[in-house]
Image (tube, grey):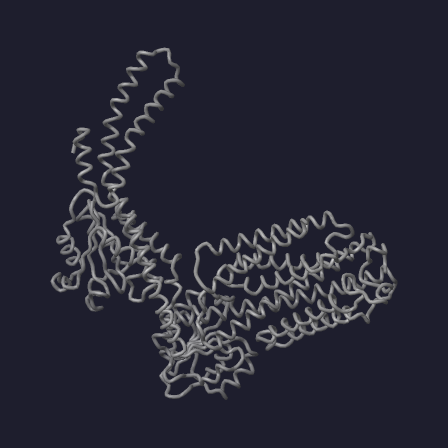
Amino acid sequence: MTIQVLGLSHHTAPLAIRERLAVGNTQLGCALGALRARYPQIEFVLLSTCNRVELYAAAEHEDLPLDQILSHFTGGRGVDRAAVTPFLSHRGEREAIVHLFSVAASLDSMVVGEPQILAQVKQAYEAATLQNCTGPLLHAAFQGALKAARRVATETTLHQRRVSIPSVAVADFARSIFERFDDKCTLVIGAGEMAEETLRYLRDEGVCNVQVVNRSDCRAADLAERWNGRALPWSRLREALAEADLVISTTGAGEPIVTAAEFAGIEAVRYERPLFILDLAVPRDFSPTIGERPGVYLYSIDDLRATCEKNLALRDRELPAAKRIIEAEADRFMAEMHHRATGPLIRQLREEWHRPKEEELARLFHRLPHLDDRSREEIRQSFDRLLNKLLHPPLESLRDHARHGIPHSLLEALAKLFRLRD
Amino acid sequence: MLSGMSIVCFAASYGVALILEITRLVFRSGIRGALMMAFAGAGLVAHTLFLAHRAATTAGLPLSSTQDWYLLAAWALAATYLYLTAYHPRTNVGLFLLPLVLGLVAVGTLLTDAEPFARESASRVWGVVHGISIIAATVAVFVGFAAGLMYVGQTWRLKRKRPTAEGMRLPSLEWLQKTNSRALVVSMVFLGVGVLSGAILNVIHRGNQVPWHDPLVITTVLMLAWLVGAVMLSVLCRPVRHGRKVVYLTVFSFVFLVIALAIWLFSETQHVGGQQGAEGKAAVVWAPRPSEGGPV
């Protein structure tokens, strides 16, 4: 019985290597199917995200031919094995389980605590299950990983602490202003990457009405199309500002595109409706004094960076507690796995004892033919109880020893004492 | 004996719930939310039993004494707290509502000797309408006040660009503003019904002699006028509807309410439950006093 993980991540490999091995959602089924066809006795789950490509493999009754599996996998991806080998890491048994649990709980992520990884782990597990690539070992391992991740999420504040500027802007500030986002108008000025990242968080909150204003109509149309929004010409910026509830600004302008005086003109038609402005541009797009106006909540990169750093420090403080949860869950899982290894012998032991019990019962019932069905059932239950009581101490000893590994010596002793087959 | 014990019981439960709310600012706990709800829930059950016992055993109209009035208002506010905490478990509404609940209970405790209104069929319905309306208006003003304080706190944090403090999460400005506006409308409607039913009670007992010169009546009518004005302003004026000014309106309403309650408690008024002046003994009040068995 063994569980191993082979792969590379942002810790060990640059993006150029990771993307060569990465398996897209559309190719995942095919890659898993090929592994399943080649190694039908082995369980597989393939986790491929932008930060990691990891192959989890497990087998109940045989050793894992990791070398061959790796060659098969890299060959299937059309990648030279020698090119990726230096970046690969391998973990086995408890180490593999601790790693899986840490990945699911987002302790191994590039941004620790980011919530997407749990969904990606779930998707990878479901995709493998769909392809019949999972069995009892990986079922148990991934269920354990999901449980550990849930515990980390509920028992620590790791996931509540946002550390990227867009996520802090949305979670710590925009959500404190607005109760719902589906009826709000979001205006994007410029087309920076950070604006798109902020839009992703806002979309998660329910934003659906997006307007894009850019000096280049073409870029505005591109971004608007990607986000199902509406592109507006630069000349309609004031009008769009008057209508907006949230503004994300990321232009490369050398001076503010909205001054306090210009905003005063817009303010008259806004009627102090709350306005959240996320000014991600350097130099800033909005004059800082606009933030002093009633109903306007203006945040620049520097305003949010301080929050990000504070959250990062608080998150670091939570890490030991999260790691303790992972260790405890891994210990529990390993104990169950080791105990599982004793299953065949326990089954044999029960079968060996069951046979003489049945013989004795048959002899007794033969000698006492006057017994009615109820009395027979009582006697049968009594024999069963006696058998269970006799078996209880050795089985408990097996369970205790399984906490520290597969109890080989104990299993051997039991096999010899009770003359059980191998 | 029972009333003393019960008040201590539910006040202590609310007190523990408030302490648990305060500890949210200091440390995290997995079971605190459940404990808070349990203590507040137990307090509300004890509070309900106490009021039921009072209603069943006190002579006169049920729950019509000044003490009952305060305890009923506290009960409604505690129920509001439980509802809000159940639906917004991460927010600290208890920090703002529970002190108000305990304040009402404390004032109610100081008024253990206040007498209930007399039981008289003609005025019973209007008495009940009057009492319930005034209590509902008071609770709405209290809720609006708590929401207003939270709004001010949330705005202060957002304007200073500070992250959410550990264990201190307030509802969004949008939610608080809606709650404020609704509290304003609800308090206006109920206070209007309360004033009207009070006037009708006087008409029933003493013809058309409503004591308009009474300080409590004056303050209450002024407060109603203020609430009507505030609601009109928030409906007609868009900046008030959207901005923080609606919050100031609810805070001013609370100040009016406190003045009215202070007059009721400490100044000479002809209203039942307040300090009776020499002429008050013979004047028309909003409901009959028990000792005289009818209009006074």
Which quadrant holds residue A336? top left
Residue at the far front in the pictured view: B1
Relative to B157, A100 lies left or right: left
**In x, y percent, where is residue A318?**
35, 63
- Report the residue that reaches farthest toward the left: A82
Q: Is residue A69 above or below residue A18?
A: above
For residue A225, say whether it is visible. Answer: no
The location of residue A121, given as percent across then percent down, is 30, 56
> Which quadrant of the rendered structure holds the N terminus of chain A?
top left
Quarter where residue B30 is shown: bottom left
Residues A101 and A205: in front is A101
Location of residue A248 by image quarter: bottom left
Residue that appears at 86% across and 60% down: B296
Relative to residue B291, is residue B152 depicted above or below? below
Side of B171 relative to A7 (left or right): right
What quarter of the picture does the C terminus of chain A occupy?
top left
As drawn, is A49 to the left or to the right of A167? left
Q: Give percent across and percent down for residue A229.
A: 42, 72
Numbered circles on residues, count = 0
**x then y, percent, for residue A256:** 42, 86
For this rendering, which residue is in front, A46 or A239? A46
